[in-house]
Image: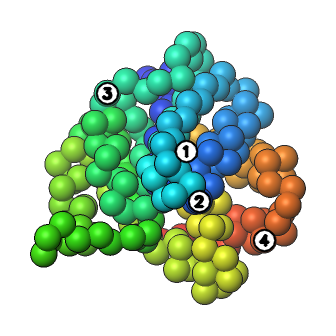
């Protein structure tokens, strides 16, 4: 945990069907196993139809509220690139790292204007973030493991192994075992795949 910051705040954003609530539960349990106080909140609308899902996880000491204040996110992990823009009000130029899965669930048009590509999204985010990283997590797990939903565990594992989240890989692996007993073998493969294939 950061010496000058008693809490570490994580925003997970994406759409229904990407396993964001499960991912939040994994982070929360791993944080608890590491001796942290943990609070988590979730907001989802028509998530089963591809609607936006946002999960907030707070780790540390003296965590009294599950809600992250504006400009106080340490990490924003966006599982769908268009959803990254919706989390901008949590970001701070001083400390926020964006980690974006370069993946688009859908690309509706507004007249003749399509949603922005990754380059445009990053350029919009950069003025409000300390760092912005993108990775084709969904493509990697689909190609290597045959299941795109494993991108969440892949992204989390990569972030933890890169030191972007102050929880141990061992505790994340324990939390994965407790939260995804079905399909555990594939989730473990996604976890270990990220060690050598997560390039930021």
Mark positioned earlier in the residue sequence (1 or 4): 1
In the displayed structure, 90 sits above or below 87; it is above
Mark toward the viewer: 2 or 4: 2
Q: Which residue lies furthest to the bottom in this view?
A: 143
Q: Answer yes or no: do the residues labelled 2 and 4 have beta carbons within 8 Å? A: no
Q: Which residue appears at 55% of the width and 13% of the height?
A: 64
Distance from label 1 to label 4 (Cα)? Answer: 22 Å
**Residue that mark 1 sits on:** 165
Q: Which residue is drawn at 82% across and 66% down?
A: 183
Q: How crowded is mark 1: few (under 14 residues within 10 Å), some or many (20 or more)?
A: many
- Name the spot of residue 22 as percent of width and height, x first: 67, 48
Q: Residue 17 carries which label?
A: 2
Task: Give the alpha-carbon distance from disc 2 to disc 4, as whole Å.
Answer: 17 Å
Which mark sits nearer the N-terminus, 2 or 1?
Answer: 2
**Residue identifier under label 3:** 70
Label 3 vs 2, first from the N-terminus: 2
- At 52% from the left edge and 80% from the top edge, which residue is drawn? 139
Residue to which mark 4 is pinned: 186
């Amino acid at each position: 945990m950061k010496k000058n910051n008693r809490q570490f705040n994580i925003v997970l954003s994406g759409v229904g069907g990407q396993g964001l609530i499960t991912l939040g539960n994994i982070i929360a349990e791993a944080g608890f196993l590491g001796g942290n106080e943990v609070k988590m909140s979730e907001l989802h609308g028509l998530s089963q139809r591809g609607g936006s899902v946002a999960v907030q996880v707070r780790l540390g000491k003296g965590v009294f509220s599950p809600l992250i204040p504006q400009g106080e996110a340490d990490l924003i992990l966006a599982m769908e690139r268009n959803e990254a823009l919706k989390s901008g009000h949590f970001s701070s130029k001083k400390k926020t790292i964006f980690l974006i899965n370069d993946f688009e669930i859908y690309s509706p048009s507004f007249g003749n204007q399509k949603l922005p590509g990754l380059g445009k999204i990053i350029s919009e985010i950069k003025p409000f973030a300390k760092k912005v990283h993108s990775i084709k997590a969904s493509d990697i797990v689909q190609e290597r493991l045959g299941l795109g939903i494993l991108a969440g565990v892949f992204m989390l594992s990569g972030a933890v192994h890169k030191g972007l989240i102050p929880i141990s890989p061992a505790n994340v692996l324990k939390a994965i075992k407790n939260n995804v007993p079905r399909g555990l073998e594939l989730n473990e493969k996604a976890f270990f795949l990220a060690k050598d294939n997560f390039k930021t």
